[in-house]
Image (spheres, rainbow, N blue to C red):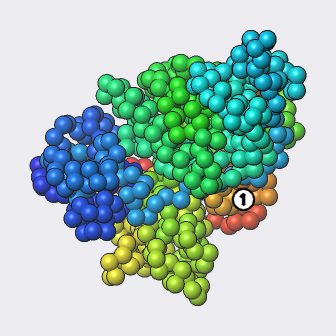
């Protein structure tokens, strides 16, 4: 066993042992980690920036101590003096391995940067925002009427707009007088009045008639990605949508890993809070630049997030969420000033609204989905599944709405998959396997053509074929099942049993070869037995959560299924059904709601009355806790089969004929032999 230090890269999860003195860039290249470099390691281009993390990492089985990397050197100092490095960043070409270390590769240092596909969904919203613009003519000061400028502005708003009272903080008051005089006593003010407020708050003032617009941000803060929609508060139009990876990934890919990090590392929660707030500030600046507006015109932000993200955003210790009874510090909605959350790149007086959480593991993002999809108003029984690292599930109709969360893990995002990667140009996102020849054809992000179509090679000349993302691995596993390459238990057959040389031996199991460009220095993309198991665990958790809600509702089928979330918007409903991710239903009754949580955030941003509505709805939702329900494990085990061991799928059988359920009928397959020996 080697004594060389262990280097673990996030978010890829790739790891390896390297001799002391190995540059991080070299380690990354040897492991196939997506770390950019243009200057060849001379410390000039700065594209290989990395962030080391220190402390206890139980998930990775490593403790990172001070001195795990070489000391800051003159090359890094020179670059920092000239262009600046973010706090905590190092240059991968200069920092060398000195001990066990966890290295985060930030999005801007990745060659294949993630495409955050949480685009805004078209939605009719009744515009009634909490923040509005008002143009007023203010009476000039008079020696005979010794009132202050604020009082005369308040009187003008009362007389001209029937607004009875206003307040202003000191920073606004300091610009009031010069603005009134510059506008010759005609000004435009932005007033914010929340649904529980008695007084309107002045958040901004401009001389004369302000025609530059007024904007808000609807932010879906997820475990893996942060997606933001810049919204016009006058029209509701989404001016730009953008996103980035949640930098907290370096502390743990899943929620419980982050809670564990906070438990094991004093001050770890504050580290994660700082990281996510800095990322939101950067995102706000980037989205304003993309839309060509001044970020100071962003005067309001609405957040939706799961409970752990909720606590870390607010600077609350999430440790209690890691142990029963999973108590939240608060489940109520919150209205506060952006500056309280260190949001400094938007308007200095911007206001923040955070939707309420439903329970300890069912957060404000699920509440936003309920606001968007309104299961409580549905006459038929609808199952809504927000697919992500932590899936949140709603089941209901006009009589009752139930909710639960299910720990699916990061496999659906392409993590923990041998050839997996985030959704980025070059990643396989669609795949079909011919059931006769067993040959694959696929599409990659960045091209609309299939791999067997003319022009495909030209389309991907820049990006290449780099790996397989979440939607791609889902389709690959389902297609393998339909093509007879995979049996009901999830076992990949040998070349002899499947009739294709693409099923290749890999240790004691087999793998299916999708694409091989290793002869040209490219990747060899396979689906391994380990990949199948990771997907089985994720889909079983998802199905078991849904089935638990159906038990609570005392039903064996649902009328329709809605797949929500960025991932849900990009997977084929047929493949999801073949895999057994969701209960059986007519395929024409399975639909995608796109980023429903983001849509709910936009509704709350654009319509102040909807905030009171979702606060009422949340109190009426019944929470089912999967962690303490005995039947969850029973459902989970049965759901390991593809599509399912015991539950019938009659609707699926109408459109898909699945091959024989098992390869375990003979032959010398070692896995089959082990199973026969266990049964014996």
**Spot occupied by residue 668 in the image (x, y as percentages of width and height):** 37, 68
Circle 1 residues within 10 Å: few <14, some 14–19, many ≥20: many
- The kind of secondary structure element at disc 1 is helix
The residue at the point 53 percent across, 47 percent down is 285
Q: Left or right? Give the position of 431 relative to 212.
A: left
Q: Give the answer, above or below, for where 29 lies relative to 324.
A: below
Q: Left or right? Give the position of 594 relative to 635.
A: right
**Spot occupied by residue 61 in the image (x, y as percentages of width and height):** 27, 40
**Spot occupied by residue 623 in the image (x, y as percentages of width and height):** 66, 26
Give residue 64's quadrant in the image.
Answer: top left
Give residue 169's quadrant in the image.
Answer: top right
The residue furthest front is: 143
The residue at the point 50 percent across, 67 percent down is 425
Give residue 378's quadrant in the image.
Answer: top right
The residue furthest bottom is: 454
Q: Give the answer, above or below, for where 34 lies relative to 204.
A: below
Is residue 550 visible to us here?
A: no
The residue at the point 56 percent across, 77 percent down is 441
Is residue 463 visible to us here?
A: yes
Q: Give the answer, above or below, for where 47 lies relative to 359.
A: below
Q: Give the answer, above or below, for where 196 lies relative to 102.
A: above
Camera-side residue: 552 or 223? 223
Say which residue label 1 marks: 652
Camera-side residue: 231 or 564? 231
The residue at the point 82 percent across, 39 percent down is 127
**Spot occupied by residue 318 in the image (x, y as percentages of width and height):** 46, 25
How many badges with numbers are in the image?
1
């Amino acid at each position: 066993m080697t004594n060389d230090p262990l280097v673990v890269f996030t978010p890829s999860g790739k790891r390896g042992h390297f001799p002391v003195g190995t540059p991080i860039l070299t380690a990354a290249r040897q492991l196939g980690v997506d770390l950019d470099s243009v200057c060849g390691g001379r410390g000039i281009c700065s594209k290989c920036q990395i962030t080391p993390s220190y402390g206890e990492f139980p998930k990775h089985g490593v403790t990172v101590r001070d001195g795990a990397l070489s000391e800051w050197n003159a090359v890094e100092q020179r670059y920092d003096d000239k262009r600046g490095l973010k706090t905590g960043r190092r240059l991968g070409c200069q920092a060398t391995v000195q001990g066990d270390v966890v290295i985060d590769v930030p999005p801007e240092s990745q060659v294949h940067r993630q495409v955050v596909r949480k685009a805004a969904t078209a939605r009719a919203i009744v515009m009634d925002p909490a923040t509005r613009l008002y143009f007023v003519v203010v009476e000039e000061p008079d020696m005979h009427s010794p009132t202050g400028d604020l009082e005369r502005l308040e009187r003008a708003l009362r007389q001209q707009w029937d607004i009875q009272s206003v307040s202003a903080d000191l920073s606004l008051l300091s610009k009031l007088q010069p603005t009134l005089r510059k506008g010759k006593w005609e000004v435009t003010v932005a007033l914010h009045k929340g649904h529980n407020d008695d007084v309107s708050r002045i958040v901004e003032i401009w001389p004369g008639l302000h025609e530059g617009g007024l904007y808000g941000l609807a932010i879906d803060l997820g475990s893996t990605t942060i997606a933001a929609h810049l919204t016009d508060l006058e029209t509701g139009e989404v001016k730009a949508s953008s996103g980035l990876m949640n930098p907290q990934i370096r502390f743990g890919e899943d929620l419980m890993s982050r809670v564990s990090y906070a438990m094991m590392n004093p001050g770890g929660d504050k580290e994660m809070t700082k990281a996510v707030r800095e990322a939101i500030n950067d995102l706000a600046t980037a989205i304003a630049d993309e839309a060509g507006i001044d970020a100071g015109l962003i005067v309001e932000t609405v957040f939706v997030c799961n409970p752990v993200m909720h606590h870390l955003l607010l600077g609350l210790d999430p440790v209690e969420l890691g142990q029963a009874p999973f108590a939240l510090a608060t489940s109520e909605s919150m209205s506060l000033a952006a500056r309280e959350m260190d949001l400094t790149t938007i308007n200095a007086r911007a206001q923040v609204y955070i939707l309420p959480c439903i329970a300890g593991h069912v957060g404000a993002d699920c509440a936003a989905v309920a606001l968007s999809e309104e299961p409580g108003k549905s006459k038929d029984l609808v199952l809504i599944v927000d697919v992500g690292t932590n899936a949140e599930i709603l089941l209901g109709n006009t009589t009752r709405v139930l909710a639960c969360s299910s720990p699916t893990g990061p496999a659906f995002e392409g993590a923990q998959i041998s050839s997996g990667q985030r959704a980025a140009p070059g990643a396989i996102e669609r795949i079909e396997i011919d059931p006769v020849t067993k040959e694959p054809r696929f599409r990659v992000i960045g091209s609309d053509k299939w791999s067997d179509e003319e022009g495909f090679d030209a389309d991907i000349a820049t990006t290449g074929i780099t790996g397989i993302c979440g939607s791609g691995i889902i389709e690959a596993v389902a297609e393998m099942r339909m093509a007879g390459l995979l049996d009901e238990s999830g076992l990949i057959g040998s070349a002899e049993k499947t009739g294709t040389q693409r099923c290749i031996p890999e240790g004691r199991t087999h793998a299916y070869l999708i694409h091989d460009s290793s002869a040209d220095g490219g990747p060899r993309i396979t689906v391994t037995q380990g990949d199948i198991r990771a997907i089985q665990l994720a889909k079983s958790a998802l199905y078991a959560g849904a089935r638990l809600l159906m038990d609570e509702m005392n039903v064996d089928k649902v009328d329709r299924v809605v797949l929500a979330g960025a991932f849900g918007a990009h997977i084929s409903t047929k493949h999801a059904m073949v895999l057994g991710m969701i209960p059986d239903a007519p395929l024409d009754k399975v639909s995608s709601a796109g980023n429903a949580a983001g849509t709910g955030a936009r509704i709350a941003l654009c319509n102040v009355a909807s905030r009171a509505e979702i606060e009422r709805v949340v109190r009426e939702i019944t929470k089912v806790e999967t962690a303490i329900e005995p039947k969850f494990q029973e459902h989970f085990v049965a759901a390991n089969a593809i599509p399912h061991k015991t539950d019938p799928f009659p609707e699926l059988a109408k459109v898909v004929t699945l091959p024989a359920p098992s390869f375990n009928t003979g032959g010398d397959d070692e896995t089959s032999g082990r199973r026969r020996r266990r049964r014996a």
